Image (cartoon, helix red, strand yellow):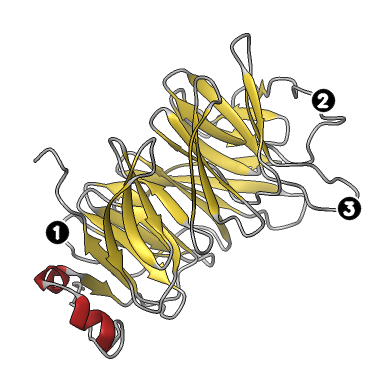
Amino acid sequence: MTESKPKPAAVLSIVMLASLSAFSDTILHHTPPFVPTGMAPLGDDRLLLWRDDGQVQIRDSNGEWSAVLHLPMQKVMQIEPEGSGFLALGAPVTPFGTSLIVALDPAGRETERWSVAGVWDIKVTPHGRRAVTRTGLLPLLPQAAVGVEEPFPAWGGDQPEEPRFPPELLYWQGGMIFCHRADLSLQHFAHARCERPGPAGWIYEDGESTLTPVACGPWLLVNEGKRQEQLVVLEMATGKVLARRNYPGRPHIACAGGEELAVGDRNLELVQLPSLKSRWHFPIAKDRVIELIALEHYLAYRGENSPDLLLVPRPAPENQ
């Protein structure tokens, strides 16, 4: 199956088409055979669409789409890219049972699997594969083995009690950042916060944000505001705020490599880091981005008004 160019009546409004240059002729349009739960970049313009019932479709670097593949699990909770392949986390059969974690190659073939209890998340870290529990990280070792838990550092600052959920782990060359989304429940209310532990550490609280921060090179991107409409750039080494920018709605973001960030709202945009200064934008008419990833040569997004996937070519870097 190959991608096709968009049909104006189905994808883009006449107003938008009239405003676009010949550049729009290279937009790629794909109608998935299922409504995706999510998508993930696999490197070299490859990407994966997945649904929580285990259906998967993979785009190769030539733009060819695979037939629908079925992962060896009934309920998929998460997909985590790993090199040119990926890890999949499956929900336990019973509420307190073990979760299934499967490693798959670029073609979606299983290479390894683990059964682990109490898993909230999976990560591909600089130190290897890890399963995230409420209290720490479990190394996922060859031949279905699981290593000794690596506990999270003590919760810093004046927070009266440990958080109810495990942190989101973000990596950079200087170490690890731990971030927690806001807990808005009446009984356990707590502000969102990110923390770098250790002697040179810092703590940053960012209000009622319920979105996962994004690591991009040496910078950390967080959403703030009542509608999560403000984008904030932090320096990972120091926790210092370097830039803020407001958007009309809640922007979706994706690290785009180098010193660029992809932003999706009513437009697609590439902004410079850490300034958040716009260097390119692309209108998407009356649609709104609901999911966005940055590939090597494309920005891939899904909008709220259509199940289709669109791949918009990225402009050449400014230094070319």
Q: Can residue 171 be seen? A: yes
- Provide residue 253's location: percent of width, then percent of height: 43, 51
Q: Residue at x 33, y 47 (%)?
A: 271
Q: Residue at x 89, y 53 (%)?
A: 186
- Provide residue 235's location: percent of width, then percent of height: 48, 27
Under mark 3, the amino acid is: Leu
Nearer to us of marks 1 and 3 is: 3
Left or right: 251 as drawn, with respect to 201? left
Q: Residue at x 63, y 21 (%)?
A: 202
User: Taking 47 as reference, is 310 above or below it?
Assistant: below
Query: Which of pointers 2 and 3 lies earlier in the amino acid sequence?
Result: 2
Crowdedness near tag 3: few (<14), some (14–19) or many (≥20) residues, C-alpha within 10 Å: few
User: Taking 317 as reference, is 58 above or below it?
Assistant: below
Crowdedness near tag 1: few (<14), some (14–19) or many (≥20) residues, C-alpha within 10 Å: few
Query: Which of pointers 2 and 1 lies earlier in the amino acid sequence?
Result: 1
Name of the residue lying farthest toward the right: 187
Label ID, residue 137: none
Q: As rendered, which of 242 and 67 lies closer to the eye?
A: 242
Mark 3 lies on residue = 186
Q: As rendered, which of 209 and 113 lies closer to the eye?
A: 209
Dividing the image into 4 quarters, which one contains the C terminus? top left
Under mark 1, the amino acid is: Asn
Under mark 2, the amino acid is: Asp
Mark 1 lies on residue = 62
Query: Which of pointers 1 and 3 lies earlier in the amino acid sequence?
Result: 1
Mark 2 lies on residue = 158
- Provide residue 110's location: percent of width, then percent of height: 40, 48
* Callout 1–callout 3 Cβ contact below 8 Å: no
Q: Residue at x 41, y 76 (%)?
A: 287
What secondary structure is marked by label 3?
Answer: loop
